[in-house]
Amino acid sequence: MHSKSSKVPFLAWLLLAGIGLTLFFTGEYRDLPIPLGWMGTVLFVAAVWFSVDRLYKFPANDAEARVAPGEWQAWIGVAFVGVVIVTSLLHADVFRAHVPIRHNPEAGQVGEKIGTLFVAWLVLVHVLKQRWAGKVLADERDLQIDRIAGEWGRWATVSCVIGIALVLGFSDIERLREFSYPFIAQMLMFTVLWGLWFDQLVAALLYWRDRRAAA
């Protein structure tokens, strides 16, 4: 009975987070002056804070202990950085304007969304570290996984940089004029995000593989 009732808040959190992300990516709905993007941000952050509250109150169990802290952090990183990447790609066009970002209200709104996601991510990671206080958070296996994942992340970043260099180097003049400085800056930031996401994904998969092998 307790197990069934404990799943209800968790499912509610997943539903709230899903609705929030859907509205977050939707933005303004066609001709209706409804700030769904802002509402999605509020719902998503509320879902994160709900999870924070549950983490404080929910007692540790064997299922949680079987997953290493590094794996928890890696999967959370995959989710949050993935959302930031999707957000950046969906709103890439707002950076095409040949004006500084501080004079581009639409670009400023995208920046606020991304900033909100990073804040929510940092809060959740901080709470998890508080929950794991007194535990060994990293051993030789964690360092090895971190090293391998870091190498994959660096190669992912390098591949993005090479791709951008090829696009800029081999595009004709007319096409180059379409690339504003804010847009190029956004592409450079994407390379960092892509490398970070790949780093987190490889780490999460390596942890998952080891856990499956030990089961």
Image: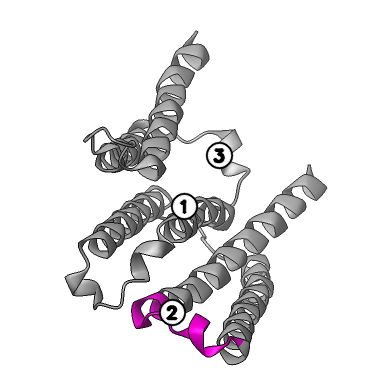
Q: Earlier in the sequence, mark 2 or mark 1?
A: 1
Identify the residue at horizontal 45%, vertical 13% (top origin).
Answer: 5
Q: Amino acid at mark 3?
A: Glu
Q: The disc labelled 1 sits on which kind of residue?
A: Val
From the viewer's perspective, tell me whether residue 74 is left or right of residue 131: right
If you read the primary sequence from the N terminus, does the residue marked by circle 3 or circle 2 appear first? 3
Queried whether the magenta region covers residue 62, the answer comes back as: no
Looking at the rendered structure, the kind of residue marked 2 is Phe
Position of the C terminus, as image quadrant, is top right
Q: Residue furthest right?
A: 213
Disc 1 target residue:
83
- Element marked by disc 1: helix
Q: Which residue is mark 3?
A: 64
Q: CA distance from mark 3 to mark 1?
A: 24 Å
Say what secondary structure mark 3 lies in: helix
Front position in the image: 190 or 180 = 180
Q: Looking at the rendering, which quadrant does residue 34 occupy? A: top left
At x 35% / y 54%, what residue is drawn? 117
